[in-house]
Each structure stands twice: as C-alpha cells, then as structure tokens.
Image (cartoon, rainbow, N blue to C red):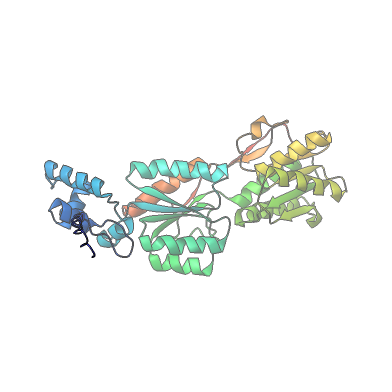
Amino acid sequence: MRLPLPPSPPLPAPAAEPNCRRSRASGRVTLQDVADAAGVSPMTVSRALRGERRVAAALADKVREVALRLGYVPDPAARALASQKSNQVLVIVPLLSNTLFVDLIEAAHKVLFAAGYHLLIGVSHYSAAEEEQLLRAYLPMRPAGLMLTGYERSAGSAQLLAASGTACVHLMELHPDSAAARLHSVGFSQLDAGAAMTEHLLAQGYRRIAFCGAQLDARVMQRLQGYRQALQQAGLADPGLEILSPERSSLALGAQLLDQVLQLGGGVDAVFFCNDDLAQGALLAANRLGLAVPTQIAIAGFNDLPGSAQMVPPLTTIHTPRSAIGAEAATMLLQLLQDQPVAQNRLDLGYHLVRRAST
C-alpha cells in the first residue's frame, strides 16, 4: 500500500521588482526610471540633477537620493543631443608619456574647468588613422569644442571636422596661411626654432653639424627644414649628415643615433637632436664612451624637457612654451564658444634658445 506524498510546501511569493526599468539596449538605469521612482517627471529629474533653482530644495534632495540609490549615471551624449549643448572639450594629443603634452593638457584643463568644461582626452600615437577613429568615436557625443595637435591629418578626419562645424583650436603649430580666418592656432614656428638652434651652433664655430630626428611627425620635419635652411645660407648643407628614424623617441634611441653619427666619419663636430629625450640619451652614451662634450662633439636638443638642465654637461636646447600654449588655446576656444571676438586667430607664443654647456 503506497502512502500518500506529503503536501508540497507553498512556493515563496515572488520578490517585488524594484521600481527601476533598465534600458534594454545598455542595461543602464534611465532618467525615466528615476522619475518613476521619485514620482516626478523626467524634466524635473533633469532640472534637479543640474541644480536648477526652479526645483524646490526638498524635492531636489529626494531626486538626488533616488538617483544615488538606483545608481543612475547621466548620459553626456544624450544630454548633448537633447540640449544641443555640451560641457565637454575633446583634446587629441600624440602621446601622454611625453611631458610636453602633459604640461599642455594640465594648463588647458585649469582654464576650461574653471569655466565649467571637462576634457575628453584622446591619444593618437602619431597616427592619422587613430586620430580619425577617435574623431568618429567622440564627435557623435557633440563636444562643445576641439583642441587638436597640428594640422596634419587624414582626408577622413578633415571631412569629419568640416561636417561637425565644431569650434576647433590647433596646438603647437601655426597655420602657414595667416589669412585663414576660420582656422585658429596657438603655437610657434617650428621651422624658425630649428633654424635658430642651427644658427647658434654655427655661431659657436661648428661646421659639420648633423641632424638626428625620430617619429618624423610634421613638427620634427619643420625643425629639419629650419636646420636645412640655416646650413644652406651658410653654404654648409650636407644631406649625408641627416639621420632620420621613424621610431618613437627615447633615451635608448638617442644613444643609437649618436653611434650612427660617429660612424659617419668626416669630423662631425655637433649634433642637433630633434628633441631632448634623444639628446639626453646621446649625452649619457657619450659619457659612457668617454667622449668629451662639447670638446669632441657638441650636443643640442629641443623642448627643454625636465632633466635637461641636470645632464652632464647641461643640455643646450630650445625652450617651448607648452603650458602657455595650453592655457592660451583654451582661452581662445572659450572665446569661440561664447561668440566673443578673437583678437588673433593665429597666436604666436614664440620660443627661446637655452644656451648651456653641451655646446
């Protein structure tokens, strides 16, 4: 005889679903979710989270508490689309491992942050293709403005920029066409700075002056052009004294390039490196090799990076005003965003030669 089975225990009541419907596409808590949970309209939520005075303080506190509890994070892209305004500025630089661009970004941040804007930072790694990818990713977010390094970019990037109509300031270089009123730039003449260093070496009595360049971006090539022009005017131009490498600049590469210079023969008596990290690496290598600088060979750099004044011997270089460029470019962009007149759309902040013991 089979005994009857004991009755099954009652099933637990289903847990109440939180009053929070997430976006099907992203799984994110939406503005509507917060509005439903707080018992107000989405517009009231938006105004409360922006801190507008038209929302009563008690209600604003309630909305913020609900948003915090639900984990709501505002979508800047959606906000920009809805309001046609954004508080974000996109800045694209070649590298963040280079002190030059870190100083520039820090200065720009201070100016823009004080005005209520936040930086979106993109790194192109000196690649026009990567810069285009960054623009395709960020321009749909409708940034208020752009800060881009130089003028050398892909046709696709140029089309994206023209179609966006976004206010843009170019950094580190001056546009060659001073009459291009729609183009805004803050920087200095890389060509003139390259010529100034070469002229300094000539004035010191050096005649076989080599040039070592790396990365070979537009600014390096402009410095090379300045070097060539100065030597041509002195009747001392020699293409065989140019050593150009597409590799990224580093101390190690500087040592390698100095070794290539020493193999040239012909009594090279000075080397102009396109930037300080190469020149610093060359100085360290010269010390290891027992080469007297500048008695046997003079070494010069560019940018006046940290550590150059502490090298043995201290490094002669070109000081570039990167912090001032960042601050002035940010100020110029704010003027464009606020429809204020810009006194100079092509702002030349200059450079200065720093003479030290290495030359």
Residue 44 in the figure: left or right of residue 24: left
Residue 247, picture quadrant: bottom right
Residue nearest the observer in this picture, 90 or 161: 90
Residue at 57% across, 45% down: 97
Residue nearest the observer in this picture, 350 or 338: 338
Image quarter of the N terminus = bottom left
Percent of width and height locating residue 300: 71, 40
Percent of width and height locating residue 185: 48, 53
Percent of width and height locating residue 156: 50, 69
Residue nearest the observer in this picture, 89 or 185: 89
Residue at 63% across, 47% down: 193
Residue 166 in the figure: left or right of residue 99: left
Q: Relative to 162, say whether 118 is above or below.
A: above
Image quarter of the C terminus = top right
- The residue positioned farthest toward the right in the image shown: 266
- The answer to whether one can see residue 228 in this image is yes
- The answer to whether one can see residue 208 in this image is no
Percent of width and height locating residue 271: 76, 44
Number of numbered tags placed on the structure image: 0
Residue at 12% across, 53% down: 39
